[in-house]
Image (cartoon, helix red, strand yellow):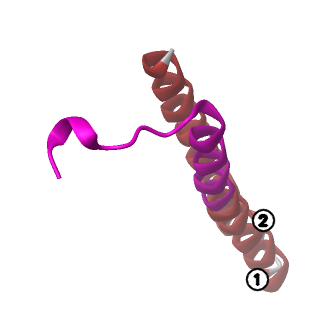
Amino acid sequence: MSKNSKRRMTDQQEFEVMKLVLDKFLWLGFGVMGWGMYTAIRDSSVLPGLWYMIAGAVLLLLFLVLIVKEYEIIK
């Protein structure tokens, strides 16, 4: 198979793949935030759990920036 005969994904197929990837990133970010909430409740101390929640929020923002940049490059 030569390089030129590779199939390109349609816009709809690219969108479906991006949705699957975004779903995993969202689960990861909210999982970290959920662990922070669990830690805060378990330890009866808000500060350790708060750091996890902040880390989860930063993770979600990081993925947001990466996805927006990737989307702008594609368009």
The secondary structure that dominates the magenta segment is helix
Q: Residue at x 17, y 40 (%)?
A: 3
Membership of 24 in magenta stretch:
yes
Q: Which residues are magenta?
A: 1-25
Q: Is residue 40 left or right of residue 17?
A: right
Give coordinates of residue 57: x percent, y percent: 67, 47
Q: Residue at x 64, y 56 (%)?
A: 20
Membership of 3 in magenta stretch:
yes
Give coordinates of residue 19: x percent, y percent: 67, 48
Q: From the viewer's perspective, is residue 4 above or below residue 36?
A: above
Q: CA distance from mark 1 to mark 2?
A: 8 Å
**Amino acid type indicated by mark 1:** Asp
Q: Mark 1 highlights which residue?
A: 43
Q: Is residue 40 left or right of residue 54?
A: right
Give coordinates of residue 53: x percent, y percent: 70, 57
Q: Which mark is residue 35?
A: none
Q: From the viewer's perspective, is residue 56 above or below residue 66?
A: below
Give coordinates of residue 42: x percent, y percent: 80, 85
Q: Between residues 51 and 3, which one lies in front from this camera angle?
A: 3
**SS assignment at label 2:** helix
Q: Which mark is residue 46?
A: 2
Q: Residue at x 54, y 29 (%)?
A: 65
Q: Between residues 37 and 29, which one lies in front from this camera angle?
A: 29
**SS assignment at label 1:** helix
